[in-house]
Every structure is written in C-alpha cells, then in structure tokens.
Amino acid sequence: MRAILVLEDGKSFNANSDLSAECFGEVILNTAVVGYQEMITDPTNAGKILVLTYPLIGNYGVAPKFNESNKIWVSGLVVKEKSRIYSNFQAKSSLSDFLKEKNALAIYNLDTRTLAVHLREKGPLFGIISTKEFDSRKLADKISQIKRQPAQTFLPEISVSKLKIIGKGKKLAVLDLGVTSGLLRQLEALGFSLNILPYNSNAKQILSIKPKGLIISSGPENDIGLARVAQNIKPLIGKLPMLGVVTGCQVLAVALGAGLSRLKLGHRGANYPLTRPGSFKGEITIQNHGYVIDHDALRKVKRLKVTACNLNDHTLEEIESKKLKLIGVQYNPVSAGFDQVNPILIKFNKLLGR
Amino acid sequence: MPRRKDIKKVLMIGSGPIVIGQACEFDYSGSQACKALREEGYRTILVNSNPATIMTDPGMADVTYIEPLTVEVLTKIIAKERPDAILPTLGGQTGLNLAFFLMKQGVLKKYGVESIGSSVEAISCAEDRELFKKAMQEIGVDTPKSGIATTVKEGMKIGLDIGFPLILRPAYCLGGSGGAIAYNKEELETFLSKGLEISPVHQILVEQSVLGWKEIEFEVMRDCADNVIMITSMENVDPMGVHTGDSIVVAPAQTLTPEEYTNFVNLCKRIIRKIGISGGGANIQFGQNPDNGKIVIIEVNPRLSRSSALASKATGVPIARIATKLAIGLTLPEVMNQVTSKTTSFFEPTVDYCVFKICRFTFEKFPYAERVLNTSMKAVGEAMSIGRNFKEALQKGIRSIEIKRFGFGADGRDKITDEMLENPDSILLKQIKDKVSTPNDERLFYIRYALKAGLSIDEIYALSRIDRWFIDNMKQLVELEDKIKRYKNKKTEDEPSIPHELLAQAKADGFSDIQLAFLLNAKEEKVRQLRKKNNTKSVYKLVDTCAGEFNAKQPYFYSTQETKDEARPSKNKKVIILGGGPNRIGQGIEFDYCCCHAAYALKEEGIDSIMINCNPETVSTDYDTSDRLYFEPLTFEDIMNIIELEKPIGVIVQFGGQTPINLAVALREAGVNILGTSSESIDIAEDRKRFKHMIDKLGLLQPNSGTVFTFEEAQKVANNIGYPVLVRPSYVLGGRAMEIVYDAELLERFIKEAAEVSGEHPILIDKFLEDAIEVDVDLIGDGETFVIGGILEHIEQAGVHSGDAAMSLPTYTLSPDILKKIREATYRLAKELNVVGLMNVQYAVKDAKVYILEVNPRASRTVPLVSKVIGIPLAKLATKVMLGKKLKDLGFTEEIIPQYVAVKESVFPFNRFPGVDVMLGPEMKSTGEVMGIDMDFSSAYIKSQIAAGQKIPKKGNVFISVHDRDKRDVISIAKKLKDLGFNIFASSGTASVLEKNNIPAKVLPKITEGRPNVLDLMKDGKIQMVINTPSGRIPRQDEVKIRSQVILYNIPYTTTIFGAQATVSGIEMFMKKDLSVKSLQEYHKIKGKKVK
C-alpha cells in the first residue's frame, strides 16, 4: 500500500508499505551494505527511523542468531528495494516476514539516495511515516506537535528490570543501557560471568555484586534518562575499572565532566577510520553514533588520554586512563570474524587483572 | 610515513599487447602509476611493447621504451637507465613474471634494483602453488584438498579421503584433456584408470570439486604501517567453474550475511599479511559452499589485476594510484581521496548502487571453437553498468556489451520466441536445460527462456548453481515483461499506451526503449515521446565512494530512475566524446587512446570534456581523464538522454571506433551537432554504393565490384568480375563475416552469413586482388589543409585483414611513383569528403596500379602507433581541428617520414581456442598489437616478432611446407636459412623443389602416412620454426593440425611467404648483432624527412 515519509522541514517521499501504520522518529542514515537485521534489533536505534543507503535489502534473509536483542527497536525502516526472496543457507525467514511477525513498519520503493543527500545537507531531522495521512503539511505539523511533548526515555523498556546473570567465571558487571547480544557473546567468550544490571543501578548496587569491572553498554544516545546514569556511576571512577561502549562511553565522559555535541551527520556505517596519535597505524571500525565527546573538557582530566580519533573529522573515538582504569570507545567493538573477540575487550580484560 | 627518499628513479613494466586475460586495465593502472610517481617527484622509466597505450605516450613517463618485454631487453634498459627500483605490480602477469625472472637471473641484484609494491618473496608466495598452499595452511586458510596418484589404488584412497565430487586431472595433458568429475566410487575408479592411461607420466591429480560453489572476490590494500582496507567485495553470478574473467560479476556481494562478510575480511587480512604485501593491493578469490558456508581460497593476485580495475571503477577509488603511493612508502591515511577530497584513502568505500560486469566474447570469429566457458578465459572485453537495483544494472550491462541486444531479451532479437516457449516440446526443453547447465556466453538468455518455459527458480538453480537471488531478479524481469505485453498495440504505427506507473517501473528495472517498443508493438521514437510526455526520464546519480555521506568533488555519473538529478550540468562550453565500449576483436585500446587524447585536447582548449563509456578497463573511464564521466551504455537512447541534459556544443564520434560511427546518422537526425567530418561524408564512406559513385567521380581506381542484397544478385556480379571475390557487409567491425570466395558454392554460404551481419545495409562483392600489397594511410584534415600522418605498408600480401597484418612505417618496398599515386589519391579523397579530423584509407597495389579498398572517416587502429612514431599527437590535433582550429596554426602541415623504422605486429588469441586454424584472412582475429622500432627494417621486424611472443631461433630445424604458387619464392628463403646454419625439414612437394635447387631438405611423411611426422618432431621440441602457407581455400586437415600444434608448443610460425621473408632476414640481422634499445624520446630527436 501507499506510504509517505515526511521530514520536519516539509520534504516528503512517496513509498510503499506492507503494513498500515504510522510512526515517528529521528531519521538516521546507515551506509553499511550488510547488517540490516543487527541494526533494526540494536536498542541503540530505539525510536529512530532508519534509512539504509544500500538499495538492496533482505537478500540474505534473517536468522535468530543475528538478533542483537529480541525486539525490533527502530520505529521505522526505510529501504530502496526489499528483496522478494532470500538466499543464504543460514536464513530462517525473510526480512518481510520478520518485520510482519514483530509488527514493525518498513517502507520501500523510495529514493533513498536523495533522502540521504538531503539529510547530509540539512543535519538531523525528525520524520514521520504514514500510510493513512498523505498531506505532508499536516504530517509536518504533527512532527512539531510530537516534538513539543516532553521527551520520553527508552531505557526502562530496553534495560533488564532486575539482575540477570549469564556465564561462569570472572565476575563482570554490565550496566544495560541497551546491550547487544554481539557484545555479550564476546564477553562470555573471554570467560566472564556477566552480571547484567538495570540501567538505573547506582554505585552502591553495582559494587555490591563485587565485580572485577563494569561495562557501560551502548544504548540510545541523548536519552533523558542518561543524565542520572552518569550521576550513578560518577562515584565509581577510580574505584572500579570501567569500559564505556558508545553511549556508555558518552555517559562516562559526562561523569568525567565533559560535554557532548551533536554531529551534523552521525557516524553510522562500517567504514570509519580511526587514527592513533603518533602512529600511522589505524583501524577501520563500525560506528553508530550521532554525538561526540568534546575534547577540551576531557583534557582537564588528569592521566586520561585520547587514544584514537576519527581520521575524517578528527572527532574523539577512544579514551583511556591507565590510572583510573577507564576505557571508552565511540565505535562498536565488534568481533573481527570467526568469533574473535575485539582487541579493546581483550585490553579491558587485561586491565582488570586476575 | 613520508615517501622514500632513497629512491630516485623507478622502472615500470607494462603488460605488452592486449591478449585475452590482459587488456586495457593495465594501461589504466600503468598510466595512473606514472602520474602518481611523477606527482611525488620520481623519475620514471617505462617499458611496454604496446604502442596503442596511453602509458607509452611520451610525456606520461620521463623515459619511454617501446621494446619487447623480455629479460634480455629489460636487462639492457636497466643497464642503461640504472633505476633504483622496479614497480612490477602494474603490468599484469607479464610485468610480474618479468620482474620475477630478472630477480632469478640476478639482474636486479647486479644493478642494485629493488622490487617495490610487491617483494619478490611475496610474488613467489602467491605464484608458487606449493609455497602458497603451505602458507595458507600455516594461517589456517583452507585450499581445495588434493593429492597426486600414480595408481588406481592410490587415487581411490586420496579420493575417498577428500570426499565426492572430485575433479580428476591427468598430468601433462594440455588443454585440460582427459579431465573428469567423479560423483561416486565407481566413476572414480573408471576415470582413474582412464586418466592414468592418458597421462604421459601416468600421474593424475585428484582434487576436491568446488564446482558450483559461490565465487567471492575481495580487493584488498595494505600499506607499510599494516593498515589494511577492503575496497569492495565482488560476487560472481556464474559460480565456480567459470574463469572470473568470463563470469558475470556483481559488486558488492549480494548474498553474504554480515557474519560471512566479516569472516571473509578476517581471512583477507590474514592472507595479505602472510603473503607479505606491504605497499600495494591484491585480489583474493574464494570459493564458498552455498550449502554450509565453508570457505576455500582459490587464488591471490599480488598485483593490480582486471578485478582491481573493476573494483576501482565500481567504487570510484583509484586503486592503481593509491597502490603506487603505498609502494613508495606512503601510508593510506596520507593519500587523499580525490573523489571526495574530504576523506583519505584509509576509508573503505561504500556504495549505494549495484554494479554489474558482463563480458564480451567473440566466438563468432572462431566458428570451430567450442562455445562453452570454463576455467580458461575466453572473453576479449567487458562492460560495467551501474543501477540502483540488480535488474537495472543487468539490463544496462547487456546493452553495454554491444551484441545487438538491448536488455534481458524481449527486444525482438530472441532466438526462441514466446510462442515457442508457451508449449515447449521436449527437444526445445532439453536444449534450454543444456544451455542453462553448461556455462556459455548465451546462458543469461537461456535462463530467461527457461523461466518463460515454466522452469522454477529451484530447477534453474539445480541446473546452473547460479544463486537463487539472481535468478529471482531475472524472474521479476520476465514477469514485468508479461505485464507490459498486455498493452501491446494492434498496429505498429499506433501510439503506445501503457499505464504511467508500469512505464516508470519498467524504466526503473532497466527496460530500454527498444524493448518497450518491441513489447508494445510500437516505434522506438514513439516510446521515447511517450516517456517524455509522462516525465519518465533518467536522472543521474554519483559514484562518490561514500554512499552520499560526503559532498564529492570529482565523482562520476550513472543513470537511473529516481526523483532527483544530481548531475548539475555546468554552464561551460562542453563537448561529448563517445567512447568505444567493451574491447572486442577489431575495436580495442587504440580507440580508447584516441578518446583520451580528445579529452586532453579539450582541456587545453578550455572546453569541458564529457566522456561516455562503459568499459571499466580503460583510461577513458578514469575519474580524472575527462571533466565529467558518464558510465553508460553506448546506445542511442542512453546517449541522447545525456545530450539532452548536458546540451554540449557538439559530439565527437570519430574516436571510439565503429560504435559511435554507427550512431552518427541517428544522432544527426535527432539534431545533434556531430563535430568534424559531416555525417553525410561518413555515410558516403560507409555506404558502398555512394562510395563507388565518389571513386568514379574522382577518377580513382577500385577493384571491380557490385552491391547486392541476395545470392542471385551476388552470383551475377561474381560472374561478371570473375573469381576470386571478396564478400563484405557494410557498417561492420574488424572484417566481420568478410571472406575471399573462389566459387559459386561457397559464395552462397557466405552471402547468407554476410546478410545476417549486414542487416538492412547492402553487401559488397569485390574483385579480390591476389598477391597485391596493401597499404594503410592515416590522414588529418581541417577542411582546408590535409596532411598525411603516415603511410604504412603491409608485410603480408592482400587478403589479410589490416588489423591482423604486420605493417611497416615508413613503407619499405614501394617505389616513389607508387607513393606519389597514393598521396594524390588520399588528398583527393580527403578534399572530396571534406575531412575535418582523421581519415584512414586502405589501398591495394598491384601491377603498378593503386586500388582503393576502403575509406574510414574516423580514427583508425594505427593512429596511436603513427602518432608515437612521428612524434605528433594526431588525435589531439584532430580534436582541435574539429573545434575549428587550423592545422597551419597548430604547426602541422607536412607529412613526416621518419628516418627509423617501426613495425607493427599483431597478436592472436589462438591458444585460447584449441584446434582452431591460425591462418590469417580477411576477417580480423587479433586481439592486440606490438611495435618493434629500430634504425633498419630487419631489426624492427625481428623486434616486433619477439615482442609478439615468438621465440626467434638462432639455430635448429625449420619445417617448410608451402602452397604450389609459393614454391618459387620459398627457395631463396630456404637457401638463406641453410646458409645461416639451420636444417630444413619439408613436406615431399616442397622438398623436391628445394632439392632441385640444391638445398638439401629432409622429407617428413604426411601425418596420416607415417611416423615420426612433423607433429611428433614438434612434440619432441625438434622443430624450432614452421613456415606453412595454406594450400587453398579449404585447408587440408594436415595443415590445420600442424598450425594448431605450433600454438600448443609455442613454436614460431609464419603462414605467409612475405612474413617468412621478413622473418628470415630478421633472423639474419639478429644473429649478426644484438638487439639494441633506444627510448622514444631519443628517436624523436632524429629529425624526419618532410614531404609537402
């Protein structure tokens, strides 16, 4: 059926949809060619309208093993062409069926390239997808109405509601702001007993389980609930080794006194180069963030070093303090294939000691 | 890290002539490398035997050698130039092998030359099967399992350990003969005993079969700081079993999960590190079992390759440029990405489109070759297309390869019609299934027939093992085709009517106007009008390396159907250059050279150049050759769309070969301004009847001829002018379907063939001038002044296509009187046709008479060669002339006759088509050319032979067997050989003539009459050269066997008496003195003789 995507600046795109629905959210781009299932099930993307710049989506189907969580978190998915069949020996169903089963809205047959260029030029925009109302002015008005309402937090819905323990071994606390199964799998492989804590756990509660260290997971950025999380973990700085992952890293930075600023176009894709000061050796990373940590405030934190920057726009991508036993990464520390654990997780493991 | 300061001079080796497997892509990589090195301030020395390349333009490198690519010659150049380093990774396998042999023979060490880009160790590790296998084992990467057996028992054990299916390859059986696939124990046993018997060494390789597995490729780069990036993944639509150079390839891979993708990346990193490439790129090929995901590595190319050219053009990343910069010590983050100008090369490009590569085959040139694809590459060229979905890219791809198809069937040219497919009989079904299961150049169309005949996706998958995803996309096109057909007109004259949405969808899925016209039973023009009325028009999107994340500074364009056009044409004055499309026999790199020069000339004149081409191998499709590049098929529809958008002041059709020339009339009729010689003149030259009229008017000579449409007419004409006659269609390329005919019986057959090729154009019957000397003349004109660029004399007698003949510049036997006649005729023709730009005329000289065979009002194949020999860039001047400049002002008003000699020799793809006769004729068969240049004819000729790959002997045995009419001429040749110390072996007829003239010759029995015959001796390496001229129009089986065997054993041969004469005098010179080397720049200092 017919669908429309309207952006808050009034720009609209005609499309098709299989589901009759309406959804709202910040419109974000991802330039990776593969990974649609991971992206839509990643809690970091909660409430977002996700636009995939690669035009052919669904080719390899979906399989439960690739879920980053058991829910589709994006409020809407926008693709150029949805594959009619899927072809991969691991696939268990088609993307369409998966979306239908989870009652998630996806629109297709629209000019995603023009949409992408528009977002690049205009900066972050909210959008609305509708299969019911096609008057773009009315829909744009609706966006401003929704934007005027007080922002809501996704954290209670995303996070575990009580302590959850998986795996055996060295005890590691994971503050769940929207942790992905990909990260948990790697940590498990390192031989941790993972104590997954609700997002609103305070320092005392965290210390009470006596972990060797704390992982502050990725999750939705700029969520109104995050300020409190930063307050909660502030007392742990210097007391407990911590690794902040993307949003977790931003929380850590805020706790350290740094501010955040918003990128005109977020880093979302699989091709972001990092460079390390004093070295010619860098890395290509997968990223999914729209906010960056301000350098200046962090410089005041003693013995904290910026260990990697984005080579394109020189924004901060990795911080480390040996003294405070802190690591923060703005990129996704994913496995480098064949279930190998990302080097930063190994590094953190070493930081914990025995 | 900063660039290396310890290196000052760098030697680069090109890839030599265009052959199957090594084409323009190495001109692209070599040219980029030249530019990159000079940007960094290095002195560059370039060696390549191919004169048709951009890289050998004086000015690309500091010192340019057009010399044979042999260790001997390279050693001389190294001794003379003393480079600090050699960059061997840009010249294909040829360059890499040469560097390897220079190292093995101690030359590099002796002169202190370092191999940069890929160390000699890295090359050995990738090239040596055993070392490679071991290295892969060490890093845990699987290779297909295999073992060598010498007994059936041994083979059974190896086979059962590996598991079925198995590939059996008997050792030392050339051309893959005796190979088989065993699916079970019984078959294994049978094939083992058969194979062991066939193998001369009684050995058989038992190998795990990966046939039908997915073939996945990655293009990987690594710098000296160990940064590794993936440029792109590629997926072969044709699964394992078809050479990747013959496969349809898409980029990026379409059916991999992120997990699989990451695993492949992981393997790529391990492999490139293990091989040890620390400043360059590699292409890595994998096989993946589609049923369980298991991966094996097939091959690593530690150099730039055809695939890297494709990856480069598919993503916008200039891989050769970057690889060169990495080779001299820079790291990826230090090399800027010029397309975005905002990112560095340490960035993995990402795309928002689908790239499709499809190959161009020329089986029609080799009618006796088996029309199947396997692991030995057969494609002569390729085209790349870009679409926003696979379907669009597929249809554009098929349009791009210029096989007179305008999409995925449904263009009125299908061999099997829809009616036949509605109720296919079992014979038809079997034919379709066979063509789907055995890889061949028409398989795509047969998949369409299969879908139309009702085969399911699963059935087609089972037959072809082509991934279901691709088949389903093809099925969508078939379904759409059926939907469109519902709106079919009753009468062709009617206005087409089709719902707006359906039309838009059809265009979005790549349907061309021609397809729509066919499906709707309407005129193409009417479809075009309807589209315009409906506002269904193409927009242009960017190849920008980053899927739109950055605002690109120097992107290129592809058409698609979307809402917004991103091409934003400039207001500057601009000219469109039409490229030549995919390489094929008859149209190759020479024309790309001319197109590039047109772009350079436009830049010098301050006019924007716009290139349209679809060949990913070429320099013309480089992001920085023209101001704007459109990666599009060269069809009327696709070109007109761009013209309407860009509104150029004119279009250049002279340089892209026959492709744009064929479009000239249609473009003019559409109101397009064709620059240079008018399309009216083009039509006169191409239309045989009008042409004849002009020749008569000018009082020039032409072989007696007639224009015909039917066999009856042809017979009348042939009887009139007398046999032998030459039959040729008009408007064709490379002498397609051209034949010399000696009697009425053959005439009938060839007229039929020619009629098929010629279409609505007439067929010409010429009197064939036996034993005439052919001459090629290139001319440039501005409408007032006309200047001959070069007169080239063919070495072979008339009847050999000019694209195949060896030629000498300047002429070497023609008298001043004849030359005068040729010049006069050329100027008269040029004036009559009012040539503005380039023209090529072919003459035949017989009995002191000069006959005109052909006039081409366009750049010819010899333009780059002539330009380089005389030191005048003819194509560049021609472009300026087309823009209104005068030759007087450009300073070129007199023909220059060089004081040195250049010989062009052709190279042939016979080794790819086992059993095919190597005889030359009026149909062109060569894929490329080389040039030998020296101060005298014999030296230049022998250099050309060596450069073409002939192993010129200095001693040994020569086998001679010639046609009766050549027997008188062969005496002096044999005598000279004898005097030079060769032993002569001959057939009985030839031997008796030689004996009578006191030249002892050993008689060898006819092949069927006794042994050892010449075949046995060739096999044993006892024949060092073969002189064999064909005995008549239908070659004897004996001769074909001999001639195909010389290819198998790479024995130097000649099939013409003139060729034999030149070769023997060349050998004489070669034995007297060593080959010397001289750069083009040095030759150009030798002033030529000027002729008004």
Image: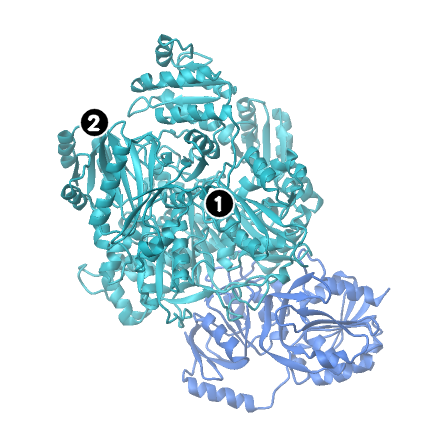
Chain colours: A blue, B cyan
| Same chain assignment for discs 1 and 2 | yes
What is the secondary structure assignment of the residue under circle 1? Answer: helix
In this rendering, the answer to whether B73 lies above or below B596 is above
Quarter residue B106 falls in: top right
In this rendering, the answer to whether B814 lies above or below B412 is above
Marks 1/2: CA–CA distance: 52 Å
Query: Along the line of sight, which residue is nearer the eye, B679 or B297?
Result: B679
Quarter residue B1002 falls in: top left
Residue linked to disc 1? B1081
Residue linked to disc 2? B743
What is the secondary structure assignment of the residue under circle 2? Answer: loop
N-terminal-most mark, 1 or 2: 2
Q: Nearer the viewer, mark 1 or mark 2?
A: 1
Q: Residue at x 55, y 27 (%)?
A: B172
Can residue B455 be seen here?
no
How far from the left and from the top, in percent, is residue B888?
31, 54
How far from the left and from the top, in percent, is residue B192?
56, 27
Name which residue type carries label 2: Asp
The chain containing the residue under callout 1 comes to: B
Disc number at residue B560?
none
Query: Along the line of sight, which residue is nearer the eye, B933 or A254?
Result: B933
Q: Residue at x 45, y 12 (%)?
A: B1011
Mark 1: few/some/many CA within 10 Å (<14, 14-19, 20+) = some
Name which residue type carries label 1: Gln
Quarter residue A169 falls in: bottom right
Numbered disc total: 2
